[in-house]
């Protein structure tokens, strides 16, 4: 069976990365400027944010999401599958575990759920280092999980993509689901920040 990989030369993701690289090389825009622009786009990671907010508000949905993310996501009318050969898995941050996602091979990423991938996610430095030194990489993002928290790094590939369910912020018990969704960031969905 042949798998179409996100890095395939004809894929929109590959063409987008080539365009981004050319714009950066020409000095038109930096990776950081492009990331800041994408973070400001309405709905840039709204699907993932909606999923997380529902998981925070509905424990049954959260359990279904962790058990079969594709089916749970489909309950919200969102694309739960990312193609016939790609599975989405949800991993949950807790008091004792923090999850981070990466694709060490090429930058596989659930675009439909998390919005456009940040330039740093595609960088060789992030992809190589986060698996070897996740605490060091998280510190560069100014995020410092306590030393007693286990950090799991999940490696996406052409068959499996991940979404991180961040810990719900304290003091948000009376906050509505849409307001909670507004708190969720793309970095939180990748695991390089808390919400």
Image (tube, rainbow, N blue to C red):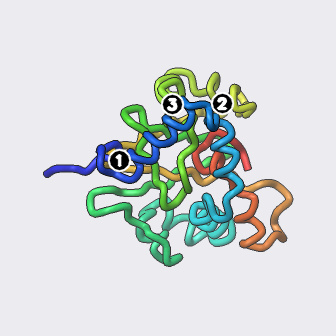
How many residues crowd mark 2 within 10 Å: few (<14), some (14–19), many (20+)? some
Disc 2 designates what residue?
138
Would you place residue 2 above or below residue 113 in this image?
A: above
User: Could you tell which of marks 2 and 1 lies nearer the N-terminus?
Assistant: 1
Would you place residue 154 above or below residue 135 in this image?
A: below
Q: CA distance from mark 3 to mark 2?
A: 15 Å
Picture coordinates of residue 193, whole percent (x, y): 69, 42
Residue 6's tag is 1
Q: CA distance from mark 2 to mark 1?
A: 25 Å
Q: Are marks 2 and 1 in contact (CB under 8 Å)?
A: no
Query: Could one spot residue 24 in this view of the protein?
Result: yes
User: Could you tell which of marks 3 and 1 lies nearer the N-terminus?
Assistant: 1
Query: Could one spot residue 97 in this view of the protein?
Result: no
User: Could you tell which of marks 3 and 2 lies nearer the N-terminus?
Assistant: 3
How many residues crowd mark 3 within 10 Å: few (<14), some (14–19), many (20+)? some
Would you place residue 187 above or below residue 80 in this image?
A: above
Picture coordinates of residue 190, whole percent (x, y): 58, 45
Check disc 1 and report its element: helix, strand or loop: loop
Picture coordinates of residue 34, whole percent (x, y): 63, 43
Disc 3 designates what residue?
123
Q: Quadrant of residue 53?
A: bottom right
Seen from the viewer's position, the closer of residues 117 and 75 is 117
Q: Residue at x 57, y 65 (%)?
A: 47
Can you tell which of label 2 and label 1 is closer to the viewer? 1
Q: Residue at x 64, y 72 (%)?
A: 58
For residue 49, side relative to residue 76 (left or right): right
Check disc 3 and report its element: helix, strand or loop: loop
């Amino acid at each position: 069976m042949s798998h179409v990989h996100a890095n395939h030369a004809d894929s929109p993701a590959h063409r987008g990365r080539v365009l981004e690289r050319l714009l950066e090389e020409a000095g038109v825009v930096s990776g950081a400027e492009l990331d800041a622009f994408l973070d400001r786009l309405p709905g840039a990671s709204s699907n993932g944010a909606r999923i997380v907010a529902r998981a925070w508000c509905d424990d049954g949905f959260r359990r279904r999401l962790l058990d079969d993310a594709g089916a749970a996501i489909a309950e919200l009318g969102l694309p739960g599958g990312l193609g016939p050969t790609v599975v989405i898995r949800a991993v949950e941050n807790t008091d004792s575990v923090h999850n981070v996602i990466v694709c060490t091979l090429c930058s596989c990423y659930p675009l439909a759920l998390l919005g456009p991938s940040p330039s740093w996610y595609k960088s060789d430095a992030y992809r190589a280092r986060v698996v070897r030194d996740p605490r060091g990489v998280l510190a560069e993002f100014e995020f410092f999980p306590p030393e007693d928290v286990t950090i799991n790094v999940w490696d996406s590939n052409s068959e499996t993509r991940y979404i991180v369910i961040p810990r719900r912020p304290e003091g948000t018990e009376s906050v509505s689901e849409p307001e909670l969704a507004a708190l969720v960031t793309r970095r939180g969905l990748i695991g390089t920040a808390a919400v």
